[in-house]
Image (cartoon, coloured by chain):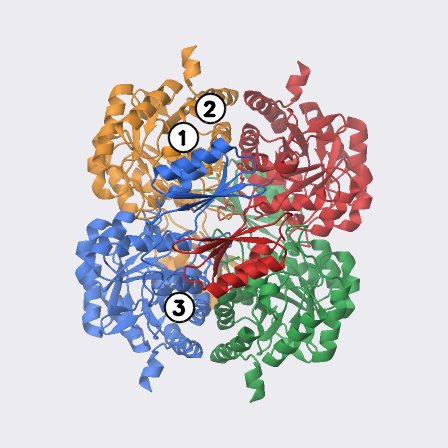
Chain colours: A blue, B orange, C green, D red
Amino acid sequence: MIVVMEPSATGGQIDAVVSRVKDLGLGAHLSAGEERTIIGVVGTSPLPPTLDEMLEVYPGVERVLRVTKKYKLSGWDFHPRKTRIPVLDFEIGGDEVIVIAGPCSVESEEQTLATARAVKAAGAKILRGGAYKPRTSPYEFRGLGTRGLEILAQARAETGLAIITEVMTPADVETIAPYTDIFQIGARNCQNYYLLEEVGKAGKPVMLKRGMSMTIEEWLLAAEYVLSQDNPNVMFCERGIRTYETQTRNTFDVAAVPVVQRLSHLPILVDPSHASGKRPFVGPLALAGVAAGADGLMIEVHPNPDHALSDGNQSLNFAEFDELMPRLSAVAAAVGRRVESGATVAR
Amino acid sequence: MIVVMEPSATGGQIDAVVSRVKDLGLGAHLSAGEERTIIGVVGTSPLPPTLDEMLEVYPGVERVLRVTKKYKLSGWDFHPRKTRIPVLDFEIGGDEVIVIAGPCSVESEEQTLATARAVKAAGAKILRGGAYKPRTSPYEFRGLGTRGLEILAQARAETGLAIITEVMTPADVETIAPYTDIFQIGARNCQNYYLLEEVGKAGKPVMLKRGMSMTIEEWLLAAEYVLSQDNPNVMFCERGIRTYETQTRNTFDVAAVPVVQRLSHLPILVDPSHASGKRPFVGPLALAGVAAGADGLMIEVHPNPDHALSDGNQSLNFAEFDELMPRLSAVAAAVGRRVESGATVAR
Amino acid sequence: MIVVMEPSATGGQIDAVVSRVKDLGLGAHLSAGEERTIIGVVGTSPLPPTLDEMLEVYPGVERVLRVTKKYKLSGWDFHPRKTRIPVLDFEIGGDEVIVIAGPCSVESEEQTLATARAVKAAGAKILRGGAYKPRTSPYEFRGLGTRGLEILAQARAETGLAIITEVMTPADVETIAPYTDIFQIGARNCQNYYLLEEVGKAGKPVMLKRGMSMTIEEWLLAAEYVLSQDNPNVMFCERGIRTYETQTRNTFDVAAVPVVQRLSHLPILVDPSHASGKRPFVGPLALAGVAAGADGLMIEVHPNPDHALSDGNQSLNFAEFDELMPRLSAVAAAVGRRVESGATVAR
Amino acid sequence: MIVVMEPSATGGQIDAVVSRVKDLGLGAHLSAGEERTIIGVVGTSPLPPTLDEMLEVYPGVERVLRVTKKYKLSGWDFHPRKTRIPVLDFEIGGDEVIVIAGPCSVESEEQTLATARAVKAAGAKILRGGAYKPRTSPYEFRGLGTRGLEILAQARAETGLAIITEVMTPADVETIAPYTDIFQIGARNCQNYYLLEEVGKAGKPVMLKRGMSMTIEEWLLAAEYVLSQDNPNVMFCERGIRTYETQTRNTFDVAAVPVVQRLSHLPILVDPSHASGKRPFVGPLALAGVAAGADGLMIEVHPNPDHALSDGNQSLNFAEFDELMPRLSAVAAAVGRRVESGATVAR
């Protein structure tokens, strides 16, 4: 850590910083330039995580610059190989770009099973479906609860698809665990730390959606909450961030894909449905995500989007999804990856 | 609700929308202009909350415009008088601008009691202090837990100050309730709906901090989760939103004060400490908040900010807080409100 | 246009709006619902562009909803075929995805010619290079001016590449016109309306970079300034918008590609160099842009990025550009377009 | 400047950075820690402004941290006294909080003179009024041009008010100069560097509005363009920044007032009309600005906002302005400043 003093800082102010640093058992190296003094803080073990904030308040301090990263387990330094997360008989984080598809909410047995069959046939590996739904307004449809979980189990049994479903509160982790293969943490809960630790303990893979205005560094730190429970199977999902632009529901930060891959060994997927919020843009964003190197995709599919109880305007119908999959395969192949679309399988 | 069809919409597309609307038991009024057709949707009771999303996906629909507001209990329509929240022997939402002050975290008995005495003497009515702390990184100080609650109780017993403390997860509501006069919901939990309902049920006043990038409409909808539990005592707290500007920790949206007051009968406070993140700006933002009409202030105060375990760089020391209070009084008086600063009391 | 009155609006307030509308020679259709009155404003010709603002201030008005779009010439309504912009012997907006490449600034004859030869060999069709550079600080390198233009002309003569270069002020349009094939309007000048009209008059194709925080609607309106000078050859270039995220220089809004294509017949390109600001992310963003359907790419290339006078950290060197081009070709092919990479040409 | 190498950086990579630094005539001090090496770059004169960008691209470099500020003339280091800008017989930047008021656009002699008289009587010192208007759409009212300037001159002659009006392009500077006391640079032109230099040369005071998404550092750098023309009379005007929140036209960053005052000796004003975009919020934001320490205010006033040709929904009428001024005076007094409202004058 580097403490930059103001040009006008006095000797006493410099001494105060140095003695605070030494009180904490750390070393301080002074470098007195012509214009100002700079203090390098060094230690044998990790520095206190809020040391920068502590030192910033000292009189005469202009800025404190952190040299080391705050996240550890999610970074490459301590885990030099890319994480591959095993799910049933496949992996997330390998060459294959995994496709997750399904309805926003589990609405009925019929709707869910029909979707499961359709997305399976088209090449999806994982079925998504919300049994517990976070809604901005308390007056909206909030999911079928345990009945929804049972329907998902049925779909898994019939199709062999893996299941991902959202958990919204620590008390539900135990209930949901037997029914899901991956826990989804939604954007609104991305910094719900009790929940992150609880799903960490459950031992199953966890997908962390990015918060509405979460920095990538905060995202990696949220992953630390899960990883620090000895659960190594964390994946990220970029779903758009909030900006001033209103043509799309969110702004799809496709650069998050290569940025996360540079900073972390954990897989990153993209969700073009929530990112765009509008059906005609789901395809182009899905293709863009694969081209940028995403390890997977999460796409909303519904038998009859016009009658969906939630997110209908961003869900593809079966024909649209069928048509998209071979295009995803083609782009994946162009960047040295693969998507097993139904068409490919059939060959 | 108004459905704007595209200029090129066909008669069949228009019929499809109309019949969907009628299926839902609603009325549809067509208005065929020279350029395009507009369909007005009317009903006797509240429309389905996601009706706009449902209709937006129909072919030929250009846009759906919502005419009525999504929030109900927090708006003026059903509650034409400003809410005044009783706390001990005073009210939040009346003429007096209530000052909440105290440390970010309860660190020790000594630190908390010294702060309680100091802020009481200066005119504060409520003591803040975190026993459970949300931290971006799992490696930071996360609060004293129940020991922290006991220290707050001691401070209340000694000074007569009311207490506000943060609750982070539904399971803690029952534990914290006996120790606090107001539940604080932090920015990271502003859309943790299980938590909102649980504090709603507890029956004590609730302060909702604004989420990092929450719209004011979403904020009012979050309040609905508490209000719909028959708990009328909800107040808001503006604490800055996330933008591209990095000179301050957040961007203090001071306009949220008059905007919320125009849309809702619920009180709104401001938190200049989190909004600015830097000690020299706390005073100016506090004064701005009072001038804009805030019903209260939440200010971080610490006996020794240089040694605080969290948020030291945005905490005032006792002398700075003492100096600020009479200035807040003066501005409050200038806008027809009052802050009972120690100086005022002493006269 | 639709004027939504407040539930509490009086008859007098409704009459005031209606009579204002009639004064303007427009028609007003009242629709009195159970809860509130809605006034439809209709006219035979385009409504006054600020009519919504005018009516919003009337007492009793809750909101004014614009039904028609503000932009005309850039939209599909009056121009149902996609615009193809002819440049030398090729077109922008057709099947081929056009690649623009070159240095941020023209620094010397040697640097520019070497780059021109390299990018030509790799398949680029247009050479970029700044002779006049907008710099945030007045103390930075601001370009070679007319000497820079001469060097660009030399590169064109030698390689046959078309030229694009930035114009920053109306007075320079005449000077630059003979040397360039396309005028570039930079992000900082995206709402410099005098400049937009002046380049419009010059009659050559114009590329409009998106402003730092410009909405897509504002972007289309900026194009109207050029188009309304009877210059039909306008193209857009998405180069990232400003958000809170700092891992990349800007946030690449890849969704702008399909959104613009849905709203406008004008071509849209992407600039992954400015969007990312960092060399390792240029490739992934370029690939994402092509996959999303971009009509072209603008990529910074420099013989020796480590010694570039500007934007070195986002410029590719020749080897990196050579390696990227066939990958762009592959992705373009996967989405039914083509990029003529050097490798392709060579076959 | 400090170059932080990656933990894995090789000796050769470190040497390459050091030798580049030395080539530029600068010194490099190595500090080899246990985890990584840090290189301090020092020089006797200002470092090249883009040195950080240059060094960031070197292999093995993790980050480059700039220690010195990029702006010079606007900062306190070289100008330790607050700037007071003389205008007619008063100053901007002294104890008095100067009020600028008037219509968005000069629409007619009658409208402008009536407004001038009204705002003068209420205590304003400067008349605002646009003769040349930047409009997002080319189809909106764009001002009266030179006829507008003549009307402003008439208002000045009659009332003794100083004049501020916007200049949009370098070619207009000479035309406008005789008619105005202060040049206004609008938000859309905040980085129009040719214009900034041209108004700098004209020698009259310049007010720089903040760009839609301009950082405060970029704002100070824009001021450098004017200051470096030997024109010391630059003032800033905060008018809101663009965010995701739509309840107000922009988000009023009131913290910009104390932040700019901490970084720069130049005065800073606020524009609550553009910041809010809605009449009911103009008053609260104006009061907040004064409480936060603003050196002045710019407020839109129109005889009949319902019929204004632009910005009617954010303009106060005469009665509203009259009512606001004594409240501004009261808040100014509460923070040790003064606003000379008409009421005060009359006493």
Which residue position holds label 3? A294
Indicate the quadrant where residue C275 lies.
bottom right
> Which class describes the residues within 10 Å of circle 3: few (<14), some (14-19), or many (20+)?
many
Q: Amino acid at mark 2?
A: Leu
Please tell me whether mark 2 sits on a helix, a strand or a loop. helix
Q: Chain of mark 3?
A: A
Q: Chain of mark 2?
A: B
Please tell me whether mark 1 sits on a helix, a strand or a loop. strand
Check residue B299 in the rendering and tell me which mark sits there, or answer none.
Answer: 1
Q: Amino acid at mark 3?
A: Ala
User: How far apart are the two marked residues, 3 and 2, measured between alpha carbons?
Assistant: 52 Å
Check residue D330 in the rendering and tell me which mark sits there, or answer none.
Answer: none
Check residue B324 in the rendering and tell me which mark sits there, or answer none.
Answer: 2
**Relative to C150, is A3 on the left or the right?**
left
Q: Are marks 1 and 3 in contact (CB under 8 Å)?
A: no
Quarter the C terminus of chain C occupies:
bottom right
Residue C327 locus on image (x, y percent): 49, 77
Q: Is residue B271 above or below residue A213?
A: above
Q: Is residue C330 above or below residue A165?
A: below
Q: Amino acid at mark 1?
A: Ile
